[in-house]
Image: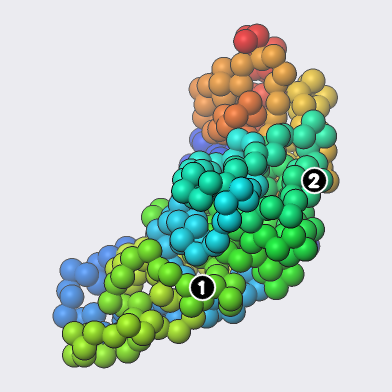
Amino acid sequence: MTLPCQRSLFDLSDEVTYLNCSYMGPLSKAVLSAGIEGLSNKSQPWKIEPSDFFSSLVTARRLFGTLIGGDPAGVAMIPSVSYGMAIAAANLPVPREGNIVLLAEQFPSNVYVWRQLALENGAEVRTVARPEDDDWTRAVLQSVDDKTAILAVPHCHWTDGTLLDLQQVGERARESGAALVVDGCQSIGALPIDVGVVQPDFLATASYKWLLGPYSHGFLWVAPRWRQGRSIEHNWIARSNAEDFAAVANYTDSFAAGARRFDVGEVSNFALLPAAIAALEQTLEWGVEEVQATIRLMTRRIADRARELGLQVAAEDRRAGHIVGLRLGDRDPQSLATALASEKVHVSVRGTSVRVSPHVYNTEEDVERFLRVLEAAWTTVPVL
């Protein structure tokens, strides 16, 4: 089922065609209001009760757990995907001469930490080359062997939305005894996932893209077997009995239950957390399957017209429905993006693709405008 256009919930100018959610999602009016209200509470701090440090966290964990099919106890609050990956790397064993599987051109937040871990353990980073037929799933499955310790992959590639079947990848990881770490930054909120089916060891995402939430806030889901693991910082609120402010100097080696030991310091952020909660509530009200179906109609139309113009696009069953990467062959993608921007049509260049990423706030007119400008600009794009 698809959704009617949700543009009225956002403060978007009709003069601008924003097809760049993969870069940064806009805040809805409700999310902005929640953030402002939360920040304004700090102007009168005597109104902030000790219970306020915890109640919003309970809500956020419950909502995010519902979104991904996971239990709230497995949810930790993090400031970024790189922070979540650092937690995963601090807990996952990598034997000498083992290997860590990554995708070519993967986003750096899910690369640098694994390169460092491999270096420290005498292991290999095994980079899966981009398959010519865009079948990342087959390419990843073929790259796993009995020495694979970790598969650190996204649900879809950040440059063009090409897709991985995480259920198959998860099954292969378990067969080989490898851990599965998922970067959900370009998928969570727009592409359905069920951690009960995929069974990742760690899954991290940021709020500011497809969750349409604030910057510097995100979520980490941790599988049960790692919830007694090592945190990468030691803040007071992650310890047991932290709710008793009078007793926080009664130091304890005991952590709070579940994945709370992995929470970032100052986790009860009075501006970001209310905004992130409001964004989660909105996404759950829409439904992720409905969001995906709605955006897919737009990207399908864009892909079909782009092919007619001679651009290359991954087959629909090889890409997520919320992102479409337009490949220009020997033409300059940045020149095309600049031409689009000059007409107030906003997209991104990532890798060799012009990445187009609408959301439910986009209208039919937005798509038509993009296609008109694309058709007019395409013939003038210079050869590299």
Closest to the observer, 123 or 46: 123
Q: Vertical placement of 381 versus 131: above or below?
A: above
Residue 167 in which image quadrant: bottom right
Q: Secondary structure at mark 1?
A: strand
Q: Which residue is mark 2?
A: 142
Residue 126 in which image quadrant: top right
Q: Is residue 189 left or right of residue 194?
A: left
Circle 1 Cα neighbour tier, 10 Å, few/some/many (<14 / 14–19 / ≥20): many
Q: Give the residue at x 66% y 14%.
A: 331
Q: Is residue 63 left or right of residue 42?
A: right
Mark earlier in primary sequence (1, 2): 1
**Disc 1 residue type (three-letter):** Val
Q: Give the residue at x 60% y 35%.
A: 105
Give percent across and percent down for residue 20.
Answer: 56, 40
Closest to the observer, 89 or 280: 89
Give percent across and percent down for residue 326.
Answer: 70, 29
Q: Give the residue at x 29% y 72%.
A: 235
Q: Which residue is mark 1?
A: 75
Give percent across and percent down for residue 132.
Answer: 79, 31
- Answer yes or no: is residue 285 visible: no
